[in-house]
Image: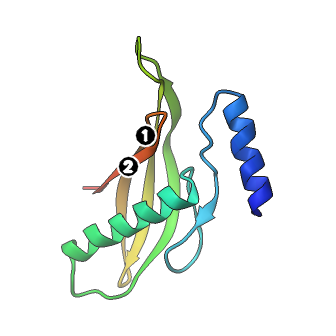
Amino acid sequence: MNVFIHRWARAAASALGLIALGGVAFAQTGPLIASLADPLLGSRAQARVLQIDDQADGRCSSRQFTAAHIARMPESIHRAGRTPEVRWVEMWSLDRCGARVDYWLYFFDLGGGAYFSAQPVL
């Protein structure tokens, strides 16, 4: 997606009162995975998942993201006197030396920045 289209999509979402989630595909390694996170947030989330996964199994040096699925679509949460929050949940799959490992990613936008947390699916 070129920069103009990406900026236009963000501006259009903002004008509609929506968070510009991007819907951009990205990947740290291997095939692209689809995520609602914008490229910067997505790359940070990928780095964190790889860090967590490396702690779980430091012997494997071959990791590749294979898929992302939207587990819970974005929803806006309104609280009196506060900026609306937008939250959504994704499940990302990672190939760790031939074994599939899944992670929950919890994304939220507090109006001034987007954040996430990640944990393995047990």
Position of residue 19 in the picture relative to residue 98 (left or right): right
Identify the amino acid type marked 1.
Phe
Instruction: Work out whether 67 lies above or below 21.
Output: below
- How many numbered marks appear? 2
Q: Position of residue 60 (x, y in %)?
A: 28, 86
Residues 53 and 115: in front is 115
Q: Position of residue 39 (x, y in %)?
A: 57, 60
Mark-to-mark CA distance, 1 and 2: 6 Å
Tell me the element at label 1: strand
User: Which quadrant does the C terminus fall into?
Assistant: bottom left
Disc 1 marks which residue? 108
Q: Secondary structure at mark 2?
A: strand
Q: Amino acid at mark 2?
A: Phe
In the displayed structure, does residue 43 sit left or right of residue 54? right
| Mark drawn on residue 116 | 2
**10 Å neighbourhood of mark 1: few (<14), some, or many (≥20)?**
many
Q: Is residue 84 visible?
A: yes
- From where the camera sits, is residue 106 visible? no
For residue 31, side relative to residue 102 (left or right): right
- Quadrant position of residue 51: bottom left
Q: Quick check: 90 above or below 26?
A: above
| Residue positioned most to the front | 112
* Mark with earlier residue (1, 2): 1
Q: Are marks 1 and 2 in contact (CB under 8 Å)?
A: yes
**Going by the picture, which residue comes out furthest to the top?**
80
Instruction: Name the spot of residue 95 as percent of width and height, x first.
Output: 41, 76
Please state the horizontal and vertical placement of residue 54, each as a whole percent of the image.
Answer: 26, 76
What's the residue at 79%, 54% (across, down)?
A: 5
Displayed quadrant of residue 118? bottom left
